[in-house]
Amino acid sequence: MKKNTTIPFDGTPEQEQQLRAVLSKLKNVPGGLMPAMQQAQDIYGYLPKEVQVIIAEELGVSLAEVYGIATFYAQFALYPKGQYKVAVCLGTACYVKGSGEIFDELSKQLNIANGEVTPDKRFSLDATRCIGCCGLAPVMTINDEVYGKITAKDVAGILAKYQA
Amino acid sequence: MKTVAELQAIKQKKGELFGAGMHHILVCGGTGCTSSKSMNIIKALNEKIAENKLESKVRVVMTGCFGLCAKGPIVVIYPEGTFYHSVKVEDVNDIIQQHVMAGKPVERLLHVEADTHEAVHKLGDTEFMRKQKRVALRNCGVINPENIEEYIARDGYQALAKVVNEMTPDEVIDTMLKSGLRGRGGAGFPTGRKWQFAKASVSDVKYVCCNADEGDPGAFMDRSVLEGDPHVVIEAMAIAAYAIGSNQGYVYIRAEYPIAVQRLQKAIDDARANGLLGENIFGSNFSFNLEIRLGAGAFVCGEETALMTSIEGKRGEPRPRPPFPAVKGLFGKPTILNNVETYANVPAIIRNGPEWFASMGTEKSKGTKVFALGGNIVNTGLVEVPMGTTLREIVYEIGGGIPNGKKFKSAQTGGPSGGCIPAHLIDTPIDYDNLIAIGSMMGSGGLIVMDENNCMVDIAKFFLEFTVDESCGKCTPCRIGNKRLLELLTKVTNGTATMEDIDRMEQLCYYIKENSLCGLGQTAPNPVLSTLRYFRDEYVAHVQDKVCPAHVCKNLIRYEIDKDTCIGCGLCQRKCPADAIERTDYVAPGHKLASMRINVEKCVKCGACMEACQKIKAIRKV
């Protein structure tokens, strides 16, 4: 997580307009802060400080509260993700079938740790909780593509498809 | 919908779901099967049907989970009920031409029983299904979850109609009490009692919530219900709302379940459009609205007070009880919270009566339970069995046993809050109280099977890493206690622990259990305690002999080359990333080249050499 703190924020005015529209709708909804942050992440792909500031101002809460929620829940990302989001399920069913080794192999091949993104922003790597296709265990995903019943040996071949 | 007659009219119009004279091809659209491209099969089927002008004779239906996820994608064809597994797009042509048009089953896609080697034509005749009893899952794999009329055709919303028109709230609660239904989320609190408390609380506003934040790693029961039969949850929540006097409900669901979220949202919209949610349901004074709130990936939000805090849009930290949510819950108002599977039982109880439900199960655990069967087992998938079914029946009959001829070592239930059941207790009838008695718990229903290659200390560490990561940090025993416990456990897996450390771990476990604020902390040490109880010899082996009997813990394994088997080809030497393999001057009898050996000082235990030597098999883990 530590590597990428310097990636500059590159939000567009269109994104900000979208964000403000969402926030004005959720302003008076009880418990609307989390849905606001979820939708903001949909717009930007992550929640940089600049976006958190806008949310805090518009919803009339402190930045600390927004940041507190952003760091509490695993779903919120403070750093951008790669073009290809690689995720390995480390739920129990996958773990007992060796997904830990698959994760280590990915980490080795991509040379990044959990939650990080490669310097060219092509790949990011995440260990996830159970994604619910335990019948295919062990499972890794790249964006929406699911790769099931794999071994550490298959990793290089799968990554190669995205490296072209 | 203003009258029950309108509901009956829809039911009658829809008629028998799979009536004669037409082929219905059901294709699983659950997360497991869609991951194996079942949507492409649906597309290909529809194309073939159009090509052969069969539109009036064949209908393709996307359904929820059939349960046998290991064999996905799954296709079932009615009226015959033929069950095909591991179907690929290339098989579609034969399904249409051979099965539908020529009336001959496609033999190669039929399920073959592992023990008898016989092909089985119908899903219901497989060993996997024979011992199951489907109550909560009765519509999963039968109806199209995105079609409200199919739900109505299967007696959907009849229970709500009956409750609103013919029963008082007290009668509804009484029915739930009599049925003996207990919470399926883990703790097993009687559902009727929960409703009774909330009804007794006086307030202008009350809430009904559904816990669909299925966070246990390896559990996917609730997701499958929501994906396969979302209306059953909506109907049950409306019934609960009527019983306690509430008008507003929230479903708190994991954002990681996109298909479930989308289908539930569609179901809510359809129910509202048909007047089954909203104002004056069935022309009564009862109004009920329902909203989805997305969880954001925090395991602690499965705890009831934390979940409500999260719906309020805050950090999902639990708070002390009492006051219980039935008195002071969401937004400070009386609230009930039940999990998805609990709700999925409610309409059937109202329709069939509490006696019917109470006739299934054991003395104190009534009805059925859904388990997500995973790990080292042949038939990975979703099973629903009467309470009191033994673990042996689930693992060996329904689950088809352990793959590759391995030995059953343990079954883990209850996720990070539960424990490991050893082989000698495999005949225990599974219900709430028996599981507690043997040091595990029902939990939400994850059931992970482990074989001789799994190290129990490593499994305990896996779960503890999970809870340490997911501890919200509010109370000290959980935040710091579990962290210290994990450090001790890591010493064991590293081979640096002493026997005193094991005693210290045990003490710490009890301290954490007794002093933590919420269920997460109170149960977090269970995986450690239960493995210490049943697999203490493995801990002792790690500590005293510095050996991991299952060859899992990296620090405690060594690779060895058998000097008489080694042919000296040097392949291992070339594959070794650490330059740890050297040639000896020993030439085994009958071999031309000197054998290799591993320098343990340099070895990083990656296992590359053993993989390289798969043909000769001269390298082994010790």
Image (cartoon, coloured by chain):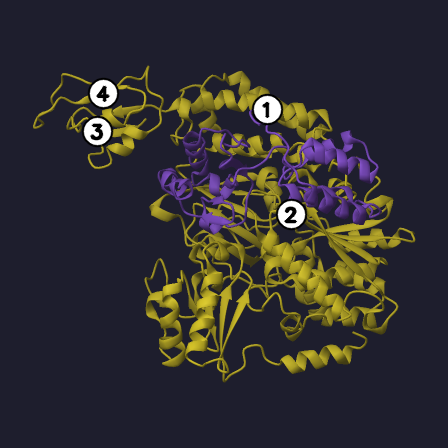
Chain colours: A purple, B yellow
User: Residue B529's x, y, as percent?
Assistant: 57, 31
- State how far apart marks 1 and 3 are (Cα): 42 Å
Residue B608 picture quarter: top left
Amino acid carrying label 2: it is: Arg
- Among numbered discs 3 and 2, the one appearing first in the sequence: 2
Query: Label 3: which residue?
Result: B571
Q: Quadrant of the C terminus of chain A?
A: top left
Tell me the subunit letter for badge 1.
B
Q: Residue at x 43, y 45 (%)?
A: B376
Amino acid carrying label 1: it is: Leu
Query: Label 4: which residue?
Result: B597
- Among numbered discs 4 and 3, the one appearing first in the sequence: 3
Element at badge 4?
A: strand
Tell me the subunit letter for badge 4.
B
Q: Are marks 4 and 2 on the same chain?
A: yes
User: Residue B375's x, y, as percent?
Assistant: 46, 45
Q: Is residue B157 visible?
A: yes
| B242 on left or right of B432 | right
User: Looking at the image, is mark 1 or mark 2 nearer the viewer?
Assistant: 2
